[in-house]
Amino acid sequence: MNRCLAGADIVGGRAVVVRAVDAEAERYWQGWGFIPSRDNPSILMRSIDDIRLWLANIAH
């Protein structure tokens, strides 16, 4: 996730998007705070700002 944040700082990214390969992977990513898209539950997203806050909180 730190590399995602660094890349987003360079290119102006706003979210990390993942494609889950199956229902188990969907649950895995949801467990890390990713939200499924309305159109396809295997595509999940989490905002860069949310990830940045999450990582800052677990670092302390």
Image: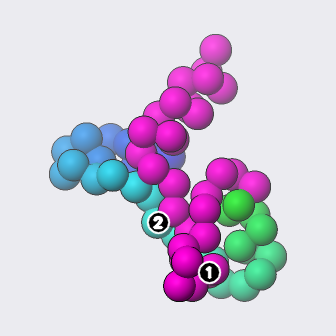
Q: Is residue 34 above or below residue 23?
A: above
**Residue located beneath label 2 in the image:** 17
| Residue at the front extreme, as displayed | 38
Q: Secondary structure at mark 2?
A: strand
Q: Specify start and end residues of the magenta stretch as a single range.
A: 31-60
Q: Position of residue 16 (x, y in %)?
A: 44, 58
For disc 1, the marked residue is 42
x, y percent for residue 53: 52, 30
Residue 15 percent across, percent down from the top left? 40, 55
- Residue 3 in view, yes or no: no
Colour mapping used in the image:
rainbow
User: In this picture, is 10 found above or below 20?
Assistant: above
Say which element carries label 1. loop
Quadrant in the picture for residue 49: top left
State which quarter of the image contains the C terminus: top right
**Separation of disc 2 and disc 1 at Cα?**
10 Å
- Reading the chain from its start, which is encountered first: label 2 or label 1? 2
Mark 2: which amino acid?
Answer: Val
